[in-house]
Amino acid sequence: MGKNNTKTLMQFAAFAMVLTVATMVKEATSMSICNMDTNDMQKCRPAITGNNPPPPVDECCVVVRAANLGCLCRFKFYLPILGIDPAKVAALVAKCGVTTVPRGCQA
């Protein structure tokens, strides 16, 4: 198998894992992903979706500050598939006062 085919296969596998987790989230009451409770993630959704999202609520920023951003960054390329603009996520992190962003997360 060629190098490009292997890379594509790995990306597909990662995407499949994200979709599996998303399905499990609907079925589970709560689970933790990258130090974030899946129920708590919903507190941030309004601040990262739509054309002119509102500022994040305090509860969202608590979740963002506790998150393992290095872990979450591994999924940033799949955010558009979920209807989330990665630039809005970066803005959310900054609005919540997080100043130390892992190198892999920077745009």
Image: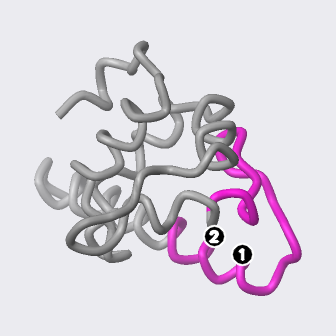
**Position of the C terminus by quadrant:** top left
* Mark sitting on residue 93: none
* Mark sitting on residue 21: 2
16 above or below 2? below
Q: Position of residue 35 (x, y in %)?
A: 72, 39
Q: Is residue 23 magenta?
A: yes
What's the CA distance linking mark 1 and mark 2? 6 Å
9 above or below 94? below
Residue shown at the point (33%, 67%) measured from the top left: 84
Left/right of residue 101 with respect to residue 64 in the rendered view: left
41 above or below 46? above
Foreground mark, 1 or 2? 1
What is the crowding at mark 1: few (fewer than 14 residues within 10 Å), some, or many (at least 20)? some
Q: Position of residue 66 (x, y in %)?
A: 68, 31
Q: Is label 1 in a helix, a strand or a loop?
A: helix
Q: Which residue is mark 1?
A: 25
Q: How is the image coloured?
A: one colour
**Residue 79, quarter of the rendered image:** bottom left
Q: Is residue 40 magenta?
A: yes
Residue shown at the point (21%, 72%) measured from the top left: 51
What is the crowding at mark 2: few (fewer than 14 residues within 10 Å), some, or many (at least 20)? some
Q: Amino acid at mark 1?
A: Val
Q: Which residues are magenta?
A: 17-41
**Residue 21, quarter of the rendered image:** bottom right
Q: Report the number of discs.
A: 2
Residue shown at the point (17%, 61%) measured from the top left: 5
Please identify the dominant SS of the magenta region: helix
Name the foreground residue: 67 vs 96.
96
Q: Position of residue 87 (x, y in %)?
A: 22, 48
**Position of the N terminus by quadrant:** bottom left
Q: Amino acid at mark 2?
A: Val
Q: Are discs 1 and 2 less than 8 Å apart at CB?
A: yes
